[in-house]
Amino acid sequence: MIERYSRPEMKAVWSEDNKFEKWLKVEVAVCEAWSGIGVVPTEALAGIRRARCDIGRMGEILRETHHDVTAFLKAVSETIGEESRYVHLGLTSSDIIDTALALQLVEAADILARDIDELIEVLQKKAAEHKYTIMMGRTHGVHAEPITFGLKIAAWVEEMKRNAYRLAEARKVIGVGKISGAVGTHATVPLEVEEVALGRLGLRVAWVTNQVVQRDRHAQFMTTLAIIAGSLEKFATEIRGLQRTEVLEAEEPFETGQTGSSAMPHKRNPELCERICGLARLIRGYAVTSLENIALWHERDISHSSAERLILPDGCLALDYILYLCTYVMRGLQVYPERMKENIEITRGLVFSQRVMLALIDKGLSREQAYRTVQRNSMKSWKERVSFLDLLKQDPDVTRSLSGTELEEIFDYKYFVRHVDEIFDRVRE
């Protein structure tokens, strides 16, 4: 368990207290449903509703029974008395465990949804702030053409909106319970009892089950967490790249008194972003386990159970934490526009190579001729570290088609960002 990283609200969802409170809540809801059809006497409900589970007492019983649900039921029955005979009537353990687990997962999903909304808000503000902050766009890690930092962040905004949608869909899929008895036949518990009990709990009915709620649902939930974590890792990896000494266009927050190395006092490391990346890998591993949990023997085995006790709480705790970290980093991100301009210009104008090629094509050259001419000058500028524009002005293959004034007009950074407003309008739609 990643206790050191857990935040209080999410930690409470996965506490033992909340887990057994949910078990008891399910048992009471089922008794109330039974009462609705006259099986459980109305007068018995008062005692059942007052039932409690003493976790310490349950632990004592568990050491004898080696079965958590029977230990739970005995501990609960000791607080009820005679009416305890109606508790767990017609049910199997998974009716309680899987239904209560759905309640926990819905609670966790709601927390994560709020985390995502907060991150989106921070990203939107950062994108708007740097809407026109020109920087180098890179492909393969190599300079391509200028973009704006705001456009980079706007793409992240849209990605997180998709993640919010994915999580909402996963919440729907996981927000189901089952009160269908052993192997799911309803032989010992009518469908009406299931529908009423789950309605009281705010869950939908899993229409057909065997002894468990089918684990493709849990796999969808966990793979959704993994996709969200993958997005956060992507953002963090970009910031790590931009924070490299040779680049230094953006930097995660570095607080007064913070140290980056025990040996080198000058170090300012992207340790928060690295932490995001590390925990995202952990969540991806959990997603693989959740996929392997889909295939159970016949109507069920419990090979999924031990794994889920780790991957579901830890996955939710880890994602909650790195969403918080990512929001903190983006809110306090240090951005260096002047450094961005410096980095654009280190290639001495090569970023305009496509513009020159297109201008030559527009003047009547074939694409192949234009490409060869521009590439020849580009490679010379790169090797000799001389101005790309100066070389073009000296090349008769270029000047036959483009004047010096026309070439200078091509070398205008505003060209690359002239559609920024329109793109941002799309983001707001």
Image (tube, grey):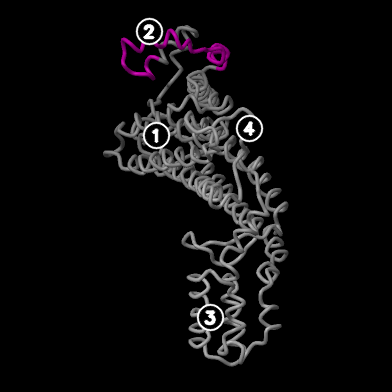
- Image: magenta residue range: 42-71
Distance from label 2 to label 1 (Cα)?
Answer: 32 Å
Above or below 372: residue 262 = above
Q: Which residue is mark 1?
A: 186
Q: State whether the magenta stretch is mostly helix, strand or loop.
A: helix
At label 2, counting other C-alpha atoms closer than 10 Å, the crowd grade (few under 14, some 14-19, many 20 or more) is few
Closer mark to the observer between disc 1 and disc 3? 3
Label 1, secondary structure: give it.
loop
Q: Which mark is residue 374?
A: 3
Where disc 3 sits, the SS reads: helix
Q: Where residue 205 appears, x then y in whole percent?
A: 49, 39
Q: Earlier in the sequence, mark 2 or mark 1?
A: 2
Q: Is residue 265 left or right of residue 424?
A: left
Q: In this rendering, would 56 be left or right of 332?
A: left
Q: How packed is label 1: few (under 14 Cα within 10 Å), some, or many (20 or more)?
A: some
Q: Position of residue 407 (x, y in %)?
A: 66, 81
